[in-house]
Amino acid sequence: MKRPRMTRRGALAATLSGAAIGLGYSRTGIRSAMAASPTRYDFQSRSIADWAVVAGQWAVEDLPGDPGPALVQRATKNEFNVIAAPAGPFADLEVSMRFKPISGREDASGGVVFRFAEGRYYVVRANALEGNFRLYTYDRGRREIASANVAAPALGQWHTVRIAATGERIQGWLDDKPLIDHRDRRFAAGKVGLWTKADSVTAFRDVVITPAA
């Protein structure tokens, strides 16, 4: 039985298809290898000129006892303070960051903003004055939609917040502990940012944004 003869065009298509699969592409949907590459901000350049300050007093500083620079928010009279990273917008993604609550009498918090667009966003935040870890929506007002009880993160120490948003599913971790697993479909895509509330003075570093593959 004769094998079907492959044309030059067919051979080229097969070669490209095999190469695409090897690079993480599929026949059903081409996926850019770069699309899943993380974007990292460690603030070593000390410039946040390409970040967008929505509210607050944000600057890169050297903190006593810390090995490198951090982004610090020092405004104490705003309801909320938000700064948006230049990358994005993103729909499905994972974000992690480290934060150090430095001071605050009314609030001592740090949070990750995601799917930020036209003043609306989700935020997952931890508060050193409260024993909870919460997910909120913001759309001309803040609304709590999920919460977990935790030991309050210690003032003056670094902690890690991580979120994953896939479709309507939103998950949150504090210091590597899974605490939030909630579904909400209000906001589909937008920028990523950092957040504090009221008189929180908070430092941030090691922001990593990874889009879904």
Image (cartoon, rainbow, N blue to C red):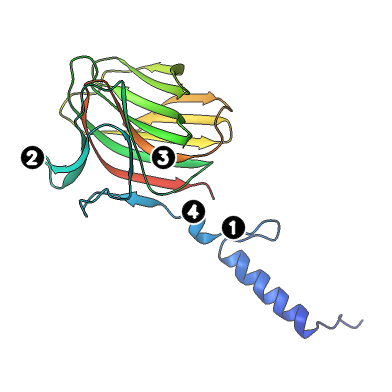
**Sequence-wise first label, 4 or 2:** 4
Q: Which mark is residue 36?
A: 4
> Dot 1: few (<14), some (14–19), or many (≥20) neighbours within 10 Å?
some
Q: CA gap, disc 1 to disc 2?
A: 43 Å
Q: Position of residue 19 (x, y in %)?
A: 61, 71
Q: Which mark is residue 168?
A: none
Q: Secondary structure at mark 1?
A: loop
- Residue under label 2, please give it: 65
Q: CA gap, disc 4 to disc 1?
A: 9 Å
Q: Secondary structure at mark 3?
A: strand
**Sequence-wise first label, 3 or 1:** 1
Q: Of the residues shown, which amino acid type is indicated by label 4?
A: Ala
Q: Position of residue 203 (x, y in %)?
A: 21, 35
Q: Is residue 1 left or right of residue 68?
A: right
Q: Of the residues shown, which amino acid type is indicated by label 1?
A: Arg
- Residue under label 1, please give it: 31
Contact between marks 4 and 2 (CB within 8 A): the answer is no
From this view, report whether residue 130 is shown above or below residue 210.
above
Contact between marks 3 and 4 (CB within 8 A): the answer is no
- From this viewpoint, which residue is outermost toward the left? 64
Q: Secondary structure at mark 4?
A: helix
From this view, report whether residue 175 is shown above or below residue 148.
below
- Residue under label 3, please give it: 192
Q: Position of residue 42 (x, y in %)?
A: 26, 49
Q: CA gap, disc 4 to disc 2?
A: 34 Å
From this view, report whether residue 123 is shown above or below residue 61.
above
Contact between marks 4 and 1 (CB within 8 A): the answer is yes
Q: CA gap, disc 2 to disc 3?
A: 28 Å
**Sequence-wise first label, 1 or 2:** 1
Q: Of the residues shown, which amino acid type is indicated by label 2?
A: Gly
Q: Secondary structure at mark 2?
A: loop
Task: Please name the residue shown 49% across and 39% down the image.
Answer: 190
